[in-house]
Image (cartoon, rainbow, N blue to C red):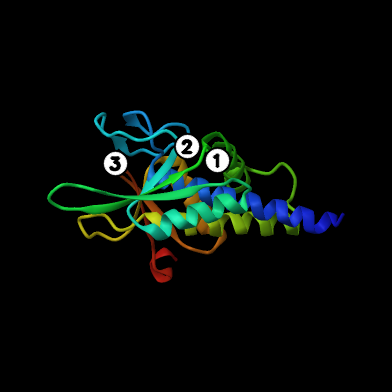
Amino acid sequence: MDIVSTGERYRASTVAAFEAAVLVRCAGVCGGGGRARALGGARVRSAFTHVPAGVLAEFNRSVAADRLVELLGAAGRSASVHRYTAGTRHRYEIFRVFCDAVSFLDRAWQQGYADLCGAPELPRSARQIRHARQLAESAWRGVLMVSGPSRSGSPGLRVPDLETATVLIRAGRMMSLPVRMSTRPGGQLLLVMPQEVAA
């Protein structure tokens, strides 16, 4: 057995699982009526909305749903995308990802959060630093896949909760992205500042 390649495969799967967790957090976890559960998405779901069992997340773009399925596959979980059309007068498509992976992604989120935001007791090795940077990049890939400018047209990315914003700020520092955060109704607003302004 090639221990090095096995370790690299494990780290790659943990990065994929962490990016999937970020995608789900930013989309809001389906289920229940009320706020999204375990993974911390903050979107309020209507009590009248019927969400089938096994739905992990909903997206309005197929590319985000397909990416989540790809990431779950890389992390060793099978998932599928189901498309349906909603609305009455104005029709639109929704892409639901089916997978029973809420607890799995919750653990991936907690581990990634600790790796990015925790203060290590010992100096990190070059491999640990490289892994943390991969987690940082995956966090930003995930949020950019599903979050966009606010409806008012102001710049910035809206994220659902403070923990996700904290991860993205720490990840931004690792990638030399000057990120600032402000609290707005419905979540946090992240702004990537120009280098000359941040200096």
Which residue occupies 20% across, 56% down?
A: 152
Circle 1 SS class: helix
Q: Are marks 2 and 1 in contact (CB under 8 Å)?
A: yes
Which residue occupies 15% across, 47% down?
A: 88
**Residue carrying label 2:** 39
The number of discs equals 3
Task: Say left or right for 171 vs 187.
Answer: right
Type of amino acid under label 3: Gly
Q: Residues within 10 Å of mark 2 (few under 14, many from 20)?
A: many
Circle 2 SS class: loop
**N-terminal-most mark, 2 or 1:** 2
**Residue carrying label 3:** 186
Circle 3 SS class: loop
Vertical side of 138 occupied by 58: above or below: above
Of residues 4 and 61, the one nearer the viewer is 61
Q: Which mark is residue 155?
A: none
Which numbered mark, 3 or 2, is in the foreground of this view? 2
**Residue carrying label 1:** 105
**N-terminal-most mark, 1 or 3:** 1
Give the x, y percent position of residue 77: 59, 45
Type of amino acid under label 2: Leu
Give the x, y percent position of residue 85: 27, 50
